[in-house]
Amino acid sequence: MRYLFTVILLGFALGVPSAEAQELETMEKNISLPVPRLEGEISLEEAIVQRRSKRSFRPQELTLAQIGQLLWSAQGITETESGYRAAPSAGARYPMEIYIVKSDGLFHYLPRGHKLEQLLPKDMRSQLAAACLGQGFVAQAPVSIVIAAVYERITSHYGSRGERYTDIEVGHIAQNVHLQAVALGLGSVPVGAFDDQAVKAVLQLPDKEQPLYVIPIGYPR
Ligand SMILES: Cc1cc2nc3c(=O)[nH]c(=O)nc-3n(C[C@H](O)[C@H](O)[C@H](O)COP(=O)(O)O)c2cc1C
């Protein structure tokens, strides 16, 4: 009962809209994600011990609930009043933008309202794999999360030290995602070996956004 109440409260906190509003949003190409779960099947300790980089995936798609949960672990709003998120951020300046590359297109995560915004309606996974120096498992994974930073959001406040803060923050976010993947029975791999400009071009990122991290995720073989 307490859990149900927490979920309802969280749905409210995340600004998850009514069915009518959801319909309207879908027409605008925004997709509301299911309310994230606050309890899982395994303990944090089990997730830590089970986490291993996985580089071979079954061709099974992930559900919207799984994708929503992974994105919530990355940048979901976990405290409404302050707007604080699942991962810490120096000065709470939140310099990251999170993208999802999957078979039906490219999507951008909107933490406010816990939504996906569709940017491109085509499968970019092979192009992303090529930009990741030909790492074939990037094309095979049903989903890749791409984390990009807007350094100015932090350096405008902290000067050049903000660059380090941004690079530290992406590690926090990525680790949440890797552990959340394990907790969902999925596997993931950190990918840092990629051509920055090529990833930018594939995702058509704005100039001010720098890709820092690619995380292919799926059911491990
Ligand atoms: C910053 C960073 C970048 C990485 N880049 C790649 C990569 O481009 N491709 C890859 O296959 N693995 C990559 N890895 C994964 C490491 O190879 C892997 O973490 C390491 O072999 C230890 O294995 P484990 O993750 O199963 O503990 C990266 C890991 C880190 C932390």
Image (cartoon, rainbow, N blue to C red):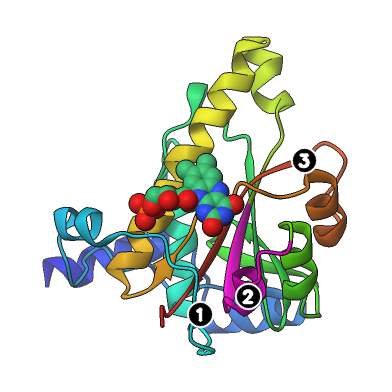
Evaluate if marks 1 and 2 touch, with contact meaning CB atoms under 8 Å apart: yes
Q: CA distance from mark 1 to mark 2?
A: 9 Å
Kindly identify the amino acid type of the residue bearing the numbered disc 3.
Glu
- Percent x, y for residue 31? 63, 75
Kindly identify the amino acid type of the residue bearing the numbered disc 1.
Leu
Few, some or many C-alpha atoms within 10 Å of disc 3 (few <14, some 14-19, many ≥20)? Answer: some
Element type at marker 2? strand
Q: Is residue 75 visible?
A: no
Q: CA distance from mark 2 to mark 3?
A: 23 Å
- 201 in the magenta segment: no
Place residue 135 in its image quadrant.
bottom right
Reading the image, the residue beneath label 3 is: 209
Which sits earlier in the primary sequence, circle 3 or circle 1?
Answer: 1
Nearer to the camera, 204 or 117:
204
Q: Is residue 30 visible?
A: yes
- 142 in the magenta segment: yes
- Percent x, y for residue 9? 31, 61
Left or right of 82 on screen, residue 8 = left
Which sits earlier in the primary sequence, circle 1 or circle 2?
Answer: 2
- Mark 2 vs mark 3, foreground winner is 3
Kindly identify the amino acid type of the residue bearing the numbered disc 2.
Ile
Task: Identify the residue at horizontal 54%, vertical 22% (top origin).
Answer: 165
Nearer to the camera, 118 or 183:
183
- Percent x, y for residue 92? 50, 28
Question: Is 215 above or below relative to 149?
Answer: below
Element type at marker 3? loop
**Residue range highlighted in magenta:** 134-146
Question: Is 15 above or below relative to 210?
Answer: below
